[in-house]
Image: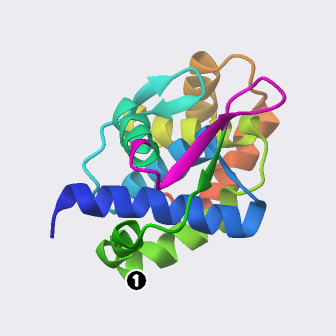
Amino acid sequence: MSENLKRLGTLLYVVRKGEEKFDYVGHTLLQKLVYLLEEAEGVDLGYRYKMYHYGPYCAEVWGDLNYLEDVDAVRIFASPDGYGYRIIANPGEPELEELDAYVGDDIKAKVEKLLSILGDKPVRFLECVATTHYAYRFLLPEDNRSFASLEKVVRDLKPHLKKEEVAEALDVLKSGGLLKS
Protein backbone atom coordinates (compact mmCIF):
# COMPACT_ATOMS: atom_id res chain seq x y z
CA MET A 1 0.00 0.00 0.00
CA SER A 2 1.28 3.41 -0.82
CA GLU A 3 2.15 5.25 2.38
CA ASN A 4 1.34 8.56 0.70
CA LEU A 5 -2.17 7.38 -0.21
CA LYS A 6 -2.64 6.15 3.36
CA ARG A 7 -1.65 9.59 4.66
CA LEU A 8 -3.91 11.45 2.26
CA GLY A 9 -6.77 9.05 2.87
CA THR A 10 -6.41 9.43 6.63
CA LEU A 11 -6.44 13.23 6.43
CA LEU A 12 -9.49 13.16 4.19
CA TYR A 13 -11.20 10.71 6.56
CA VAL A 14 -10.52 13.01 9.53
CA VAL A 15 -12.00 15.96 7.63
CA ARG A 16 -15.09 14.00 6.55
CA LYS A 17 -15.79 12.52 9.99
CA GLY A 18 -15.10 15.82 11.71
CA GLU A 19 -17.44 17.57 9.32
CA GLU A 20 -20.18 15.00 9.99
CA LYS A 21 -19.88 15.60 13.72
CA PHE A 22 -19.02 19.30 13.95
CA ASP A 23 -19.76 20.92 10.54
CA TYR A 24 -16.05 21.45 9.80
CA VAL A 25 -12.55 20.67 11.06
CA GLY A 26 -10.11 23.35 12.11
CA HIS A 27 -6.40 23.18 11.31
CA THR A 28 -5.42 22.92 14.98
CA LEU A 29 -7.81 20.01 15.56
CA LEU A 30 -6.43 18.25 12.48
CA GLN A 31 -2.82 18.75 13.57
CA LYS A 32 -3.40 17.59 17.15
CA LEU A 33 -5.58 14.65 16.15
CA VAL A 34 -3.02 13.37 13.64
CA TYR A 35 -0.24 13.88 16.19
CA LEU A 36 -2.12 11.77 18.77
CA LEU A 37 -3.10 9.24 16.11
CA GLU A 38 0.58 8.65 15.46
CA GLU A 39 2.19 9.13 18.85
CA ALA A 40 -0.53 7.90 21.21
CA GLU A 41 -2.43 5.42 19.04
CA GLY A 42 0.59 4.02 17.17
CA VAL A 43 -0.55 4.70 13.60
CA ASP A 44 2.56 5.25 11.48
CA LEU A 45 1.84 7.90 8.87
CA GLY A 46 5.45 9.06 8.64
CA TYR A 47 4.85 12.58 9.93
CA ARG A 48 7.49 14.23 12.11
CA TYR A 49 6.30 16.67 14.74
CA LYS A 50 8.08 19.47 16.56
CA MET A 51 6.90 21.79 19.30
CA TYR A 52 5.33 24.94 17.91
CA HIS A 53 3.08 27.82 18.95
CA TYR A 54 -0.05 25.71 19.65
CA GLY A 55 1.76 22.50 20.59
CA PRO A 56 3.10 19.71 18.37
CA TYR A 57 3.03 20.71 14.70
CA CYS A 58 4.01 19.08 11.40
CA ALA A 59 4.43 21.14 8.24
CA GLU A 60 3.99 17.98 6.13
CA VAL A 61 0.40 17.64 7.41
CA TRP A 62 -0.30 21.16 6.17
CA GLY A 63 1.43 20.34 2.87
CA ASP A 64 -0.66 17.20 2.38
CA LEU A 65 -3.79 19.15 3.26
CA ASN A 66 -2.90 21.76 0.64
CA TYR A 67 -2.39 18.97 -1.89
CA LEU A 68 -5.89 17.68 -1.07
CA GLU A 69 -7.18 21.19 -1.71
CA ASP A 70 -5.29 21.36 -5.02
CA VAL A 71 -7.02 18.17 -6.22
CA ASP A 72 -10.41 19.43 -4.97
CA ALA A 73 -10.78 16.87 -2.17
CA VAL A 74 -11.12 19.57 0.49
CA ARG A 75 -11.70 23.29 0.72
CA ILE A 76 -9.78 25.45 3.19
CA PHE A 77 -11.22 28.77 4.33
CA ALA A 78 -9.95 31.37 6.76
CA SER A 79 -12.17 31.32 9.85
CA PRO A 80 -14.62 34.23 10.00
CA ASP A 81 -13.27 35.19 13.43
CA GLY A 82 -9.85 35.78 11.87
CA TYR A 83 -8.14 32.92 13.71
CA GLY A 84 -7.24 29.70 11.97
CA TYR A 85 -8.87 27.79 9.16
CA ARG A 86 -12.02 25.83 8.46
CA ILE A 87 -11.56 22.69 6.43
CA ILE A 88 -14.43 20.91 4.71
CA ALA A 89 -14.60 17.93 2.38
CA ASN A 90 -15.45 18.51 -1.25
CA PRO A 91 -17.16 15.27 -2.34
CA GLY A 92 -17.80 14.22 -5.87
CA GLU A 93 -14.58 13.00 -7.43
CA PRO A 94 -14.75 9.18 -7.66
CA GLU A 95 -10.94 8.87 -7.61
CA LEU A 96 -10.82 10.79 -4.35
CA GLU A 97 -13.54 8.64 -2.82
CA GLU A 98 -11.22 5.69 -3.42
CA LEU A 99 -8.69 7.13 -0.95
CA ASP A 100 -10.96 5.73 1.76
CA ALA A 101 -9.77 2.23 0.80
CA TYR A 102 -6.28 3.11 2.05
CA VAL A 103 -7.55 3.81 5.56
CA GLY A 104 -8.00 0.60 7.54
CA ASP A 105 -10.88 0.00 9.91
CA ASP A 106 -8.46 0.17 12.84
CA ILE A 107 -7.35 3.68 11.82
CA LYS A 108 -10.96 4.76 11.29
CA ALA A 109 -11.89 3.57 14.79
CA LYS A 110 -8.95 5.46 16.29
CA VAL A 111 -9.85 8.64 14.38
CA GLU A 112 -13.42 8.44 15.65
CA LYS A 113 -12.18 7.87 19.21
CA LEU A 114 -9.91 10.91 18.99
CA LEU A 115 -12.68 13.04 17.47
CA SER A 116 -14.89 12.15 20.43
CA ILE A 117 -12.12 13.26 22.82
CA LEU A 118 -10.87 16.36 20.97
CA GLY A 119 -13.62 17.44 18.63
CA ASP A 120 -15.54 20.64 19.22
CA LYS A 121 -13.08 21.75 21.91
CA PRO A 122 -11.36 25.14 22.11
CA VAL A 123 -7.90 25.54 20.60
CA ARG A 124 -6.44 26.11 24.06
CA PHE A 125 -7.68 22.68 25.18
CA LEU A 126 -6.22 21.03 22.06
CA GLU A 127 -2.92 22.82 22.62
CA CYS A 128 -2.77 21.73 26.26
CA VAL A 129 -3.65 18.08 25.61
CA ALA A 130 -1.16 17.68 22.76
CA THR A 131 1.60 19.60 24.57
CA THR A 132 1.06 17.55 27.72
CA HIS A 133 1.32 14.34 25.71
CA TYR A 134 4.45 15.58 23.91
CA ALA A 135 6.10 16.57 27.19
CA TYR A 136 5.20 13.28 28.83
CA ARG A 137 6.38 11.18 25.91
CA PHE A 138 9.47 13.04 24.72
CA LEU A 139 10.68 15.46 27.39
CA LEU A 140 10.38 13.56 30.68
CA PRO A 141 12.55 10.63 31.64
CA GLU A 142 10.46 7.49 32.28
CA ASP A 143 11.63 7.37 35.90
CA ASN A 144 10.43 10.94 36.61
CA ARG A 145 6.93 11.34 35.23
CA SER A 146 5.36 12.83 38.32
CA PHE A 147 2.63 15.41 37.85
CA ALA A 148 4.88 18.12 39.31
CA SER A 149 7.62 17.35 36.78
CA LEU A 150 5.14 17.19 33.91
CA GLU A 151 3.44 20.42 34.91
CA LYS A 152 6.80 22.21 35.10
CA VAL A 153 7.84 21.07 31.63
CA VAL A 154 4.46 21.94 30.08
CA ARG A 155 4.33 25.35 31.76
CA ASP A 156 7.96 26.07 30.78
CA LEU A 157 6.89 25.46 27.18
CA LYS A 158 3.51 27.18 27.53
CA PRO A 159 3.56 29.64 30.47
CA HIS A 160 -0.01 30.78 29.72
CA LEU A 161 -1.42 27.35 30.59
CA LYS A 162 -2.60 26.87 34.16
CA LYS A 163 -1.84 24.00 36.50
CA GLU A 164 -5.53 22.97 36.41
CA GLU A 165 -5.48 22.82 32.61
CA VAL A 166 -2.44 20.55 32.63
CA ALA A 167 -4.15 18.33 35.22
CA GLU A 168 -7.28 18.15 33.06
CA ALA A 169 -5.19 17.34 29.97
CA LEU A 170 -3.41 14.56 31.85
CA ASP A 171 -6.77 13.15 32.99
CA VAL A 172 -8.09 13.23 29.41
CA LEU A 173 -4.98 11.47 28.13
CA LYS A 174 -5.12 8.81 30.84
CA SER A 175 -8.87 8.18 30.58
CA GLY A 176 -8.59 7.95 26.80
CA GLY A 177 -5.77 5.42 27.03
CA LEU A 178 -3.45 7.82 25.22
CA LEU A 179 -0.43 7.54 27.53
CA LYS A 180 1.89 4.60 27.51
CA SER A 181 3.61 4.10 30.84
Q: Residue furthest right?
A: 81
Question: Looking at the image, which residue is at 77% across and 38% down?
Answer: 165
Q: Is residue 109 magenta?
A: no
Residue range (magenta): 70-85
For label 1, the residue is 105
Q: Residue at x 55, y 25 (%)?
A: 153
Image quarter of the C terminus: bottom left
- In the image, 142 versus 97, the foreground residue is 97
The quadrant where residue 59 appears:
top left
Local crowd size for mark 1, using a 10 Å CA cut-off: few (<14), some (14–19), many (≥20): few
Residue 170 % position (x, y): 65, 49
Q: Classify residue 67 as left or right of residue 166.
A: left
- Marker count (numbered): 1
Q: Quadrant of residue 9?
A: bottom left
The question of residue 81 being in magenta is answered with yes
Pick whichever, 27 or 132, lies toward us: 27
Identify which residue, 55 or 156, lies in the foreground.
55
How far across and how far down the image is residue 54, in percent?
60, 27
Figure quadrant of the N terminus: bottom left
Which element carries disc 1, helix, strand or loop? Answer: helix
Residue nearest the viewer, comparing 92 with 53: 92
Q: Is residue 104 above or below residue 121?
A: below
